Amino acid sequence: MIASLAVTGGAGVAAVAQAQNFPVKPMRIVVGFPAGGGTDIATRAVAQKLSENFGQQVIVENRPGAAGNIGAEFVARAAPDGYTIFMGSVSLSINATLYAKLNYDAQRDFTGVAHAVSAPFILVTHPSVPVKNVKEFIAFAKARPGQVNFATAGAGSGAHLFMELFSLMADLKMTSVHYKGQAPATVDVLAGQIPAQFDSIMTLYPMAKQGKLRAHAVSTIQRSPLAPEVPTLSEAGVPGYDADAWFALMAPAATPKDIIARLHGEVTKALQTPDLRERLRGIGATPGSGSPEQFNAMLRNEIAKWANVVKAAGVRVD
């Protein structure tokens, strides 16, 4: 028994030492969307600060496709050693119901590291669309059932389901046009090919400020400090609308708890630094908070919330 305790105690000390020394080589954060979108922008801001704090390179690796599922599956199957982690987004909670068959389970195959960033989506239209606010947009769409197109970052993306929730609550019938990422979707909205888009404030609001797009509302229940003049959708004509485009760092489920604790501590420290907070604020994002366990609970709630929207809207992706 004494020998057994000695072995067990030695393993525990070794694990603590491993966590304290972590990382000893470059890490990578996988993003399930192309470069240039909201998830990518937020991830690169956090990764840069983590590189400085860890003294090791933190590489952002884009593995786009299937509304983030390709990147998610890759990390779910990665070695659970903390060196390959995933920047999950609200799409992860949507996909749990949206896809009939997934090669991973968001709750079973992942564990939360940190709720890193929150940022609203913003509803925009091309300036040629004859609407100046949400109520006018609703009237415009209702007068043309099924004829008003909106661009998304892909079937099942946050951009898709945020607009579906809007359509359900405002009793609209619109047509989604799916692209391989936010950037190509925005290109066609800027060109006037597609009249509307509901996506990350990080990329769309600067274009609205330049007059290239017209901003109508943000998705969260509170206004964005970046765009205080833009009302919330709840204020602007759809009472009770509230959807957060969150981003969270996640690791394979079998990752040791002490490695998760080390990662969580360093991410939390990074998010508290004034320069990163200011950088996030400048792109319309706010630092997340809470323990890994609190994020895991939040993920469960988000999956249930978006399951209701997927079912009510009759959206399905195979």
Image: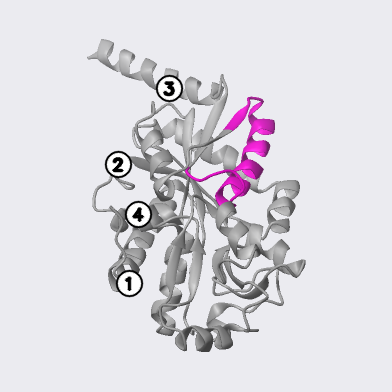
Q: Is residue 276 above or below residue 145?
A: above
Q: Assign the magenta stretch its main secondary structure.
A: helix
Q: Measuring 46% from the left and 67% from the top, which residue is drawn there?
A: 162
Amino acid residing under circle 1: Ala
Residue under label 1:
313
Q: Residues within 10 Å of mark 2 (few under 14, many from 20)?
A: some
Residue under label 2:
104
User: How far is disc 3 from disc 1 in space, using C-alphas?
Assistant: 48 Å
Residue under label 4:
95
Residue 301 placement: quadrant: bottom left
Q: Residues within 10 Å of mark 3 (few under 14, many from 20)?
A: some
Q: Is residue 212 above or below residue 157?
A: below
Q: Secondary structure at mark 2?
A: loop
Q: Nearer the viewer, mark 4 or mark 3?
A: 4
In the rendered image, residue 50 lying in the magenta stretch gets the answer yes
Amino acid residing under circle 4: Asn
User: How far is disc 1 from disc 2 in space, using C-alphas?
Assistant: 24 Å
In the image, the segment drawn in magenta is 32-59
Colouring mode (rainbow / by chain / secondary structure / one colour): one colour
Q: Describe residue 271's horizontal placement relative to residue 95 as left or right.
A: right
Task: For residue 58, say whether it is visible.
Answer: yes
Q: Secondary structure at mark 3?
A: helix
